[in-house]
Image (spheres, grey):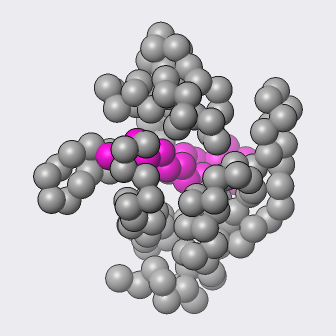
Amino acid sequence: MNLWIEIYTDPKIMDHIGPTLSKEKAIKLFEKVTVENQDNLFYVIRNTHNSQKVGMIGLMTKLTKDSCYELGVMIHKNYSNKGYAYKATQILLKLAFKQMNAHSVSTRCHVLNSGANRISKALGFVNKGIISDGKSARKFNCWEMTDELFKANNRLSF
């Protein structure tokens, strides 16, 4: 939970994600998404050489559709742009489509988060358009990968 709190309370990391939270609100959010929603999967991303925690990745079920998931990745600012998000997303997509029989996986990236948008495009997600967060006026690219796209995508066969 320490990494979760460190990320959610850091204004620089949260700039392209959402509002920066207080420690108390970060703890409440952690409890809500991990304890109250047992169907969601959350993993810590670690450096393979020294086991240092570098970020988090999650796969959340969408209540509106069966076998549809939303993927989220957060990398600590000290480890960004080092390939951790790309590799972790590859692994989680493989889990979603090959073991969980997902029909689709979507992700949202702030329009100014060039790294996250570049990863989504490089992995074969299709940009479905831009949505706006009504509370903060932040704009997000919505990306989607279907099971058909996954099967046809050579970048994900490892």
Q: With respect to residue 15, does 104 lie above or below?
A: below
- Image location (x, y in percent) of residue 5: 41, 24
- Image location (x, y in percent) of residue 140: 75, 49
Q: Does the magenta stretch include residue 71?
A: yes
Residue located at (84% from left, 35% from top): 137
Residue located at (64% from left, 42% from top): 16
Magenta stretch in the rendered image: 54-76
Quadrant of the image for the C terminus? bottom left
Quadrant of the image for the N terminus? top left
Q: Closest to the observer: 103 or 83?
A: 83
From the viewer's perspective, is 130 left or right of 64?
right
Snapshot quadrant of residue 88: bottom left
Residue located at (55% from left, 53% from top): 71
- Furthest residue toward top: 24
Residue 58 visible to an observer of this rendering: no
Q: How many marks?
A: 0
Snapshot quadrant of residue 102: bottom right
From the viewer's perspective, is 61 left or right of 54?
right
Residue 5 visible to an observer of this rendering: yes
Q: Closest to the observer: 70 or 126?
A: 126
Q: Is residue 73 magenta?
A: yes
Q: With respect to residue 144, does 9 lie above or below?
A: above
- Image location (x, y in percent) of residue 52: 21, 45
Residue located at (55% from left, 28% from top): 11
Q: With respect to residue 39, does 92 lie above or below?
A: below
Q: Tell me the chief SS of the magenta region.
A: strand
